[in-house]
Amino acid sequence: MKRYQTLHCHTKTSDGFLTHRQVLDICEENNIGVVAFTDHDSLPKDKVIKELLENKKHPTKWIVGIEISADKPSDFKEKFSPHIVGLFVDPFNKDLIKHCEMAQEARRERMSHMVKRLNGLGFNLTEEDCLKASKGEAVGRPHIVQAIKSREENLEVIEKLRKKMEQDANKNEALKVKYDLMMQRGENQYPYVLFLSDDSYIKNVYVDYLYRINLDDCVKLIRKAGGLAFFAHWFTEINKCDETSMEKLLREDRIDGAETVYGFYDDIKDEFKRQRAILQKIINTYHKLESGGVDAHTEEQLKDFAKDSWYAGLTIDMGEKILSSGKVDGKWSSL
């Protein structure tokens, strides 16, 4: 039986909650045959690489990758912030390592600014809380949320803000749509919709990335590290990087492909199918490559992905097709 794949997955190296070995074991138990480790602006440490190389015979095959938070190409007018997934990259490439060091330092500074603003909202939060949640590595918003929720009094502040948004939403139709969607998606979304996103209900708490390289430089960095670059979860940028823009990137060989499978909510499944059809048409036209996966951070997400046989089935053979394209070698994978 063909096994599923997720060529986009996070670990404790960035904002995931599992070690690399735990991911491999959970994937094996849930019929996921290939996983790419694509942590945010982070590469596996030497100890992890050694462990992966010693586990090349693990039933679940692995690929070394990275997810880079990039800026728009310099010749694009519309501002957007693409995430680019690099697959089959050399984790010892000096330029890629230097990028990660600069990105992580900027992430810590960004976190510091947001902590100060959150305390101004009434939260009890310290930088040390966030660093503890991240294990001192790639600190991001999920770690800030985890640190906030570790104190009971902070949950009361979140509830107070939720009630305020509810009241305002009754007077504002656009805000009501956002509020209803937040409630539908559950408590895990509250902090992001309320105060921790660029379009959140409470303004001036979220801080954008303080360090980015543009998309073209990002792709060059990945390619020089021996990898291939894929546009990740298009739905997050589709309003600013539309079909015409995506076609331009692929036609001009400024990217190697795009994820045609990415995390989605059941309520927008039809929209996902529409987007996927557009991407596949462009990719086929310009002889590019497909990638994708569940963008997992937790054990639950991996298990839920594997339960959806239709969705997970779309990923079968993705890694092998990328490798067989001849555009990359498999040195940094067990495929």
Image (cartoon, rainbow, N blue to C red):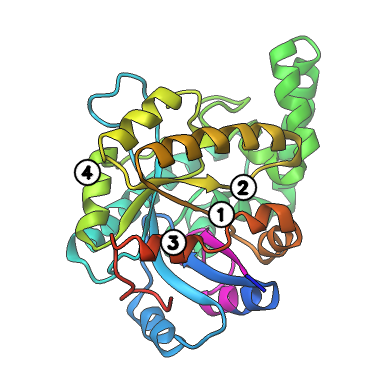
Look at label 3 and name its amino acid. Lys
Lower sequence index among marks 1 and 4: 4
Look at label 1 and name its amino acid. Asp
Q: CA distance from mark 2 to mark 3?
A: 21 Å
Local SS, label 2: loop
Q: CA distance from mark 1 to mark 2?
A: 6 Å
Lower sequence index among marks 3 and 4: 4
Q: CA distance from mark 1 to mark 4?
A: 23 Å
Local SS, label 1: loop
Q: Is residue 193 magenta?
A: no
Provide the residue span drawn in magenta: 3-24
Q: Is residue 164 visible?
A: no
Q: Which residue matches tag 4?
A: 217
Please report the residue visible at 75 percent of the width from the left and 41 percent of the height from the top: 266
Q: Position of residue 142 (x, y in %)?
A: 57, 51
Look at label 4 and name its amino acid. Asp
Q: Which mark is residue 15?
A: none
Q: Which residue matches tag 1?
A: 295
Please report the residue visible at 66 percent of the width from the left and 63 percent of the height from the top: 302
Front in this rendered view, residue 129 or 211? 211
Q: Which residue matches tag 3?
A: 321
Look at label 2 and name its amino acid. Gly
